[in-house]
Image: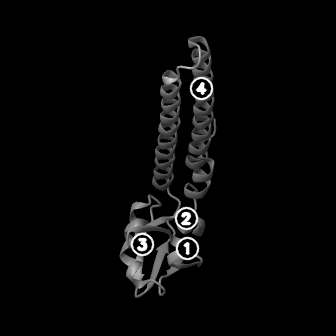
Amino acid sequence: MKADFIKNLTVRSTSGSVEQLLVKFDGKEYEMQELAQISRKPKFIVLNVAGFPTAIPAILKTIQQSGLNINPQQDGTTIFLPIPKVTKEHRENLSKNAKAIFIRYRDEIKDTRNKVVKSLKKKTDMSEDAIRRMQGQVEALCEKYLKEAESLLETKQNELTGSQD
């Protein structure tokens, strides 16, 4: 989650956030940096897609759906990504994206907990007390990671919106 926050949720868009985008092309997923040469200009991120011109529609679609608030502009096999100005609306959108990432990881933690609890309940070679103790430990571990994730979310949202507590 920390890595996703750092990579995808910065006030100023970076070329690093574009490099890691997954593009579905020819039935496979590729990172953007595998399909395009990425360079940064003062107000643009420039993608040179001369090596894979047939991937341009997939790349454009991926960028538009990325939530980076970038409107790509195509000129032949070159795609220009204007870096958006830092507005309050942009900050709020980034904050919403942080919440969506948090929810995804929260659900993954809960799914993992549920799988482990189900597998523990199926065990027949352990006493019920041992199973209950292990379930308690799993629950405590899950709660610890959920609180840590909530703390990360709150910190990131404060950083993105510019508010301090």
Closer to the camera in the image, 66 or 21: 21
Q: Position of residue 77 (x, y in %)?
A: 43, 86
Categorize mark 4 by other alpha carbons within 10 Å: few (<14), some (14-19), many (20+): some
Q: Which image quarter holds the C terminus?
A: top right
For mark 1, what is the residue?
33
The amino acid pointed to by label 2 is Gln
* Distance from Cα at disc 2 to Cα at disc 4: 33 Å
* Distance from Cα at disc 3 to Cα at disc 2: 12 Å
Position of 18 relative to 146 (above/below): below
**Label disc, if present, on residue 98 of the rendered structure:** none
Q: Earlier in the sequence, mark 3 or mark 1?
A: 1
Closer to the camera in the image, 95 or 143: 143
* Distance from Cα at disc 3 to Cα at disc 1: 11 Å
Closer to the camera in the image, 58 or 60: 58
Q: Earlier in the sequence, mark 1 or mark 2?
A: 2
* Distance from Cα at disc 1 to Cα at disc 2: 7 Å
For mark 2, what is the residue?
20
* Distance from Cα at disc 1 to Cα at disc 4: 39 Å
The amino acid pointed to by label 1 is Gln
For mark 3, what is the residue?
59
For mark 4, what is the residue?
138
Q: Position of residue 136 (x, y in %)?
A: 59, 19
Mark 2 and mark 1 in contact (Cβ < 8 Å)? Answer: yes
- Residue at x 56% of width, y 54% of height: 9
